Image (cartoon, rainbow, N blue to C red):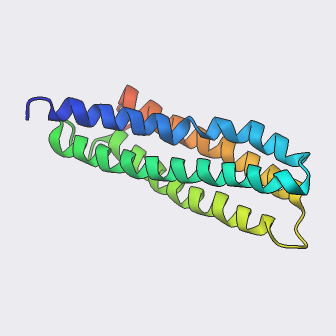
Amino acid sequence: MKYMYGTIVFVHVVSAVLAIGPLFLLMPTIKRLRNADFSTENAYLTIINVIIRLVMHAGHALVVSGALLLLTGPWPWFTSWVIATLTILLVSGVFLSSGFTKVLRRYYLPDSNKGEILTVLTRTSWIYIGLMLIMLWLMVQKPVLW
């Protein structure tokens, strides 16, 4: 019981790293996918799908560990930085599901513009990284917003 809070903090930090870090691997992978031939295209798409799944599952661990930290820690749910983090969390969750999965599904369509899809995927990645970094800042800094 003595080390429970510290363990939850550790899980929360590791899941935050896993929810943000792999996204930076998307950029060089997408860049290589732009010039890939048909035989290697599926390998790059598999890597992208694995990265997105890892980020998604790490996000689940991040949410669960964050909720446990709020339940066992000194901060109440109605603190301004908690509310702001939860709001951005909901936006990023919707954004992640629509921004990556739906875009990747369009990639396999026969009449799709693959260059445009990869541009959207790159932009989506940077936006999601930005959202995650804002949440990281809120969780570390814990600013009083109102």
The residue drawn where x is 69% and y is 54% is 46
The C terminus, quarter of image: top left
Displayed quadrant of residue 26: top right
- Name which residue lies at 60% across and 51% down: 50
132 lies left or right of 30 = left
In the picture, measured across the screen, residue 72 lies left or right of residue 22, that is: left
**Where residue 113 appears, x then y in whole percent?**
90, 63
Instruction: Judge whether 135 appears above or below 67 on screen.
Output: above
Q: Is residue 77 visible?
A: no
Position of 104 with respect to 118 (left or right) is left
Furthest residue to the bottom? 110
Residue 135 point in image, percent of width and height: 46, 39
Q: Residue furthest front?
A: 39
Left or right, 22 with respect to 120, comes to: left
State the quadrant of the N terminus: top left
**Count the marks: how many?**
0
As drawn, the residue found furthest toward the left would be 1
Q: In the image shown, does 28 or 85 lie closer to the viewer?
A: 28
Q: Is residue 68 visible?
A: yes
- Image-quadrant location for residue 31: top right
Residue in the picture at 25% in, 37% down: 8
Q: Nearer the viewer, residue 96 or 109?
A: 109
x and y percentages locating residue 85 in the rendered image: 41, 44
Residue 12: % across, % down: 34, 37
